[in-house]
Structures are given as structure tokens and as C-alpha cells.
Amino acid sequence: ASLIGFPPGFAVTSFTNNQSFFSPGMEIFMRWEETGVFSSISYEGEFGSGYMSNEVLAKVGLFF
């Protein structure tokens, strides 16, 4: 989706000193061909000046 007539991005400006932000993420995905079962586990973290957030997500499913 997009808004017609508006720029595709925007800039964020800090009212205090420069802000640094680090956002690592990784995912491990496994699929067993003979059964169609899959599983994955992922992690996403956000670390910045006085801010920290962590998220872990696990999935199990079936391809059919």
C-alpha cells in the first residue's frame, strides 16, 4: 500500500543528543521433507540509548 502524492520515506530527528540504535535478529528454520513438518525459532532485539526490547518466537507447522 502507498499514499499517493507523499514521499516514500521520512526522517526522524532527535531533540537531544545523537541517538544510537542496534537491532539484531536471527532465525533457525528446519523442515523434515518426509513428514512435511517444520519448526523455527527466531530472535529480535532492539538496543539503544536507555531502551531495550527482546522478542523470541517459536513456530511449529505442517506443509500440505
Image (cartoon, grey):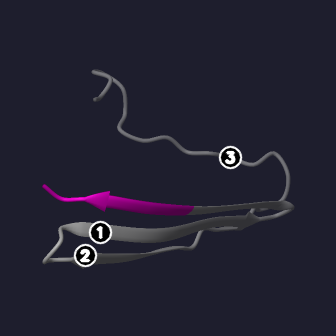
Q: Quadrant of residue 19?
A: bottom right
Question: Would you name the residue on which mark 3 appears?
Answer: 13
Identity of the residue drawn at 53% across and 61% down? 57
Q: Is residue 63 magenta?
A: yes
Q: Is residue 16 above or below residue 34?
A: above
Question: Mark number for residue 38?
Answer: 1
Q: Secondary structure at mark 3?
A: loop
Label drawn at residue 29: none
Magenta part, dominant SS: strand
Q: Quadrant of residue 55?
A: bottom right
In the structure shown, which secondary structural element does the residue marked by tag 1 occupy? strand
Comparing 36 with 18, the one in front is 36
In the rendered structure, which amino acid carries the disc numbered 1?
A: Phe
Question: Residue 17's x, y, as percent?
Answer: 84, 59
Marks 1,2: beta carbons within 8 A: yes
- The residue mark sitting in front, 3 or 1, is 1
Is residue 48 found left or right of 55 in the rendered image? right
Range drawn in magenta: 57-64
Which image quadrant is residue 50 in?
bottom right
Q: Amino acid at mark 2?
A: Arg
**Inter-mark Cα distance, 2 to 3:** 43 Å
Residue 27 painted magenta: no
The answer to whether 30 is drawn above or below residue 50 in the figure is: below
Q: Which tag, 2 or 3, sits closer to the chain's start?
A: 3
Report the Cα–Cα distance between label 1 and label 2: 4 Å
Quadrant in which the C terminus is drawn: bottom left
Counting from the top left corner in percent of width and height, residue 29 is at: 35, 75
Q: Which residue is pictured at 37% across the width and 69% down the height?
A: 39
Of the residues tagged 2 and 3, which is closer to the observer? 2
Residue in the image at 75% along x and 49% along y:
14
**Residue 31: image tag:** 2
Badge 3 or badge 1: first in the primary sequence: 3
